[in-house]
Image: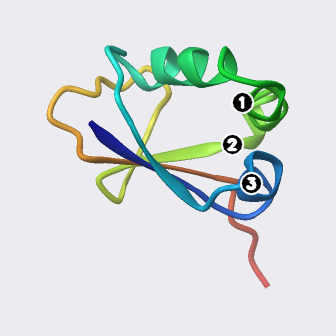
Amino acid sequence: MIDVLYFAWVRERIGLPRERVETSAATVADLVQELRGREQRYEAAFADLTSLRVALDQELASFDAPLAGVREVAFFPPMTGG
């Protein structure tokens, strides 16, 4: 089980701030594919991965990063300065 957290417009599109996910995904990209296959709201949230960032156990990561041993995955839009 992995805790998946959603922030900003990702949370708005999915309708949840977080959920526990049972997954066999090897990488973040695999997890995204599993989530996109669930429902239209996930498809909408993950339609454009270039507008998303991901953190694994609170460390920035890439979408090809492995999930082995990871407890938490967070998806959020890029931060802006100001």
- The residue to which callout 1 is attached is 49
The quadrant of the picture occupied by the C terminus is bottom right
Q: Is 2 above or below relative to 12?
A: above
- The residue to which callout 3 is attached is 15
Q: Are marks 2 and 3 in contact (CB under 8 Å)?
A: no
Q: Which quadrant of the figure has residue 68? A: top left
Q: Are marks 1 and 2 in contact (CB under 8 Å)?
A: yes
The quadrant of the picture occupied by the N terminus is top left
Q: Is 64 above or below relative to 19?
A: above
The local secondary structure at tag 2 comes to loop
Residue 64 horizontal side relative to residue 13, left or right: left
Direction left: furthest residue: 69
The residue sitting at 78% across, 38% down in the picture is 45
The residue sitting at 74% across, 77% down in the picture is 81
- How far is the residue under mark 2 from the one under mark 3? 17 Å
Residue 73 horizontal side relative to residue 29, left or right: left
- How far is the residue under mark 3 from the one under mark 1? 18 Å
- The residue to which callout 2 is attached is 52
In the image, 1 versus 32, the foreground residue is 1
Label 3: few (<14), some or many (≥20) within 10 Å? few
- Where residue 54 appears, as percent x and y from the top left, is 51, 44
The residue sitting at 71% across, 56% down in the picture is 11
